């Protein structure tokens, strides 16, 4: 796409958040980028996470949410998944910047003598490194506009260097090429029902103290922002009324672009950045978004996993299910079930899975809850309930099959039992001498060869596919003959046949599991094929 910006220079939109976390900055960022894309601009997003971790890879998903894997092997914040789903563009690891990554770059430069004896400081050295990363990505991808989301809340000490870098960028590239959107909250107390603007006023004051004046204020609220609240926010925040955008609740997140566009978001951005085009060409998007709120019945799915206390641990799984449901006009109702529930005498409890039309086991690591997952996989097979396993759900489904069909009673994974006599799942050879935890798994996209005349080939309708991975363990092919002789089909492989990627069970309604993370490839209007087949079959049950 040809650049449409002034003199070919990328423009930058900075999205900050105030009042509290969890307001939906990620959805606001994604929706804003999508509107600009629909208007014909080449757009991408960057997420800044102020924590000191190098990336999200070693973080507990129950505390932080899902680790989203990019095609180039980045272990990223889950908002990167939102960006990909909205603008249908693959991100790279460069699109997720952390304090840890910036500090590592700065310290490495200092050790190499690149600062020529200077005293290395937050300003200018750390802020220069932040800016250099953003400029480099925008220029490398030849973007018209980059939308940058700063994680956390204005006032947090961790985010100050990033906000300072934003302030400096506005000076360097000019106000015609930069724009600040501040996402805040207008709560309505049940007692009075009035939308309160004080939290927004105070949040903007905090942003001003840092040296940033927002151009647009996106106000999260349950009901549309009242004219009185809009007037107050405009007055006290020194933002024009038409630039106070009501981000009220929508039937689904995919309706948010329409909501904020109806409030004048794209017009406000176009005026501030002197953009020529200010109207989106919706194409099929409105129809796709509508499919998530209009249903003809529902499909009840049990997601049995290890990290279900925080559904955000599996946010891409949830979206992939909803994409598949929307494509056939069904609402997918998900119940999150802790796999530990089916351990230590929980055999009777597993009968509750008969109440579901499908069972999905997502990714995970470690022994806790693993026996419950093995029991779940076996229960789905024995009771002919549609089953989809992802990564860990693939590995433990093979173990369940080996135990209950092949008669290998002590079959296990060396991850769960290092002394097992039948290591059905084992360390990948290249992982054996790795000691660091971060960034050392088999990560990112890999080409997968799909065997013809299989369920996998029927679903994907392709001889080769590319999907993303995140694992250290794999199926031990010393047991390939035993499981295939008993009826299991391993229908896809990668790395010249060294790794099995898909299992399926002929004669079952739908018993399908994949070593890769299929959920990361699903998009609204284009559900990932394994999820699509699973939900369609479950809907028949």
Image (cartoon, helix red, strand yellow):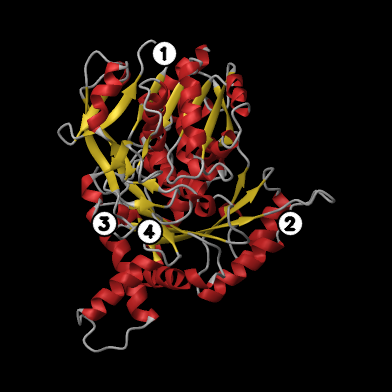
Residue at image mark 1: 508
Mark 4 / mark 3, whichever is N-terminal: 4
Q: How many marks?
A: 4
**Residue density around tag 1, few if under 14, some if 14–19, many if 20 or more, within 10 Å:** some
Tell me, yes or no, if residue 335 can be seen here.
Answer: yes
**Residue density around tag 4, few if under 14, some if 14–19, many if 20 or more, within 10 Å:** many
Mark 2 / mark 3, whichever is N-terminal: 2
Identify the disc placed on residue 434: 3
For the N terminus, which image quadrant?
Answer: top left
Does the CB distance between marks 1 and 3 fall below 8 Å?
Answer: no
> Between tags 2 and 3, which lies in front?
3
> Between tags 4 and 3, which lies in front?
3
Q: Secondary structure at mark 1?
A: loop
Instruction: Residue 215: give x, y in percent of width and height.
Output: 51, 61
> Between tags 1 and 2, which lies in front?
1
Q: Is residue 194 above or below residue 412?
A: below
**CA gap, disc 2 and disc 4:** 37 Å
Identify the disc placed on residue 196: 2
Instruction: Residue 464: give x, y in percent of width and height.
Output: 21, 27
Mark 1 / mark 3, whichever is N-terminal: 3
Q: Along the line of sight, which residue is nearer the eye, 519 or 279?
A: 519
Residue at image mark 4: 55
Tell me, yes or no, if residue 7 can be seen here.
Answer: no
Instruction: Residue 282: give x, y in percent of width and height.
Output: 43, 32
Q: Residue furthest right?
A: 191
**CA gap, disc 4 and disc 3:** 18 Å
Instruction: Residue 67: give x, y in percent of width and height.
Output: 42, 48
């Amino acid at each position: 796409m040809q650049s449409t910006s002034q003199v070919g220079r990328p423009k930058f939109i900075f999205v900050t958040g105030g009042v509290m976390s969890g307001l939906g900055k990620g959805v606001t960022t994604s929706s804003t980028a999508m509107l600009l894309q629909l208007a014909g601009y080449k757009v991408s997003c960057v997420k800044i996470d102020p924590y000191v971790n190098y990336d999200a890879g070693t973080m507990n998903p129950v505390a932080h949410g899902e680790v989203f894997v990019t095609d180039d092997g980045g272990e990223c914040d889950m908002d990167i998944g939102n960006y990909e789903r909205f603008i249908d563009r693959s991100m790279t690891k460069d699109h997720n910047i952390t304090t840890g990554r910036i500090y590592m770059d700065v310290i490495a430069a200092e050790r190499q003598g690149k600062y020529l004896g200077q005293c290395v400081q937050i300003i200018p050295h750390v802020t220069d490194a932040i800016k250099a990363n953003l400029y480099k990505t925008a220029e490398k991808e030849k973007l018209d506009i980059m939308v940058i989301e700063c994680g956390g809340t204005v006032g947090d000490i961790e985010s100050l260097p990033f906000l300072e870098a934003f302030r400096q960028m506005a000076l360097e590239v000019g106000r015609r090429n930069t724009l600040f959107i501040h996402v805040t909250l207008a709560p309505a107390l049940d007692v009075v029902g009035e939308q309160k603007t004080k939290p927004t006023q105070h949040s903007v004051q905090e942003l001003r103290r840092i040296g940033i004046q927002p151009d647009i204020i996106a106000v999260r609220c349950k009901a549309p922002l009242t004219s009185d609240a809009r007037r107050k926010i405009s007055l006290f925040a020194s933002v024009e009324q038409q630039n106070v955008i009501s981000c009220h609740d929508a039937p689904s997140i995919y309706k948010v672009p329409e909501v904020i566009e109806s409030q004048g978001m794209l017009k406000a951005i176009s005026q501030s950045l002197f953009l020529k085009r200010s109207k989106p060409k919706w194409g099929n998007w409105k129809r796709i978004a509508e499919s998530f709120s209009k249903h003809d019945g529902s499909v009840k799915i049990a997601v049995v996993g290890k990290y279900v206390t925080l559904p955000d641990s599996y946010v891409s799984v949830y979206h992939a299910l909803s994409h598949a449901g929307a494509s056939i006009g069904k609402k997918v109702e998900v119940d999150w079930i802790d796999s530990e529930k089916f351990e230590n005498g929980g055999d009777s409890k597993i009968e509750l899975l008969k109440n579901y039309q499908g069972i999905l086991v997502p990714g995970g690591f470690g022994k806790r809850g693993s026996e419950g997952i093995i029991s779940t996989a076996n229960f789905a097979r024995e009771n002919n309930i549609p089953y989809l396993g992802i990564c860990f759900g693939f590995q433990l489904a093979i173990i369940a099959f080996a135990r209950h069909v092949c008669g290998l009673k002590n079959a296990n994974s060396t991850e769960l039992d290092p002394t097992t006599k039948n290591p059905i799942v084992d360390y990948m050879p290249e992982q054996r001498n790795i000691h660091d935890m971060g960034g050392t798994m088999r990560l990112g996209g890999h080409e997968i060869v799909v065997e013809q005349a299989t369920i996998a080939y029927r679903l994907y309708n392709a001889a080769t596919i590319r999907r993303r991975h995140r694992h250290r363990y794999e199926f031990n092919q010393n047991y390939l003959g035993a499981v295939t002789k008993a009826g299991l089909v391993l229908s896809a492989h990668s790395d010249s046949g060294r790794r099995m990627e898909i299992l399926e069970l002929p004669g079952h309604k739908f018993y399908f599991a994949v070593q890769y993370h299929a959920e990361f490839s699903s998009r609204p209007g284009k559900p990932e094929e394994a999820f699509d087949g699973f939900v369609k079959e479950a809907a028949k049950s």
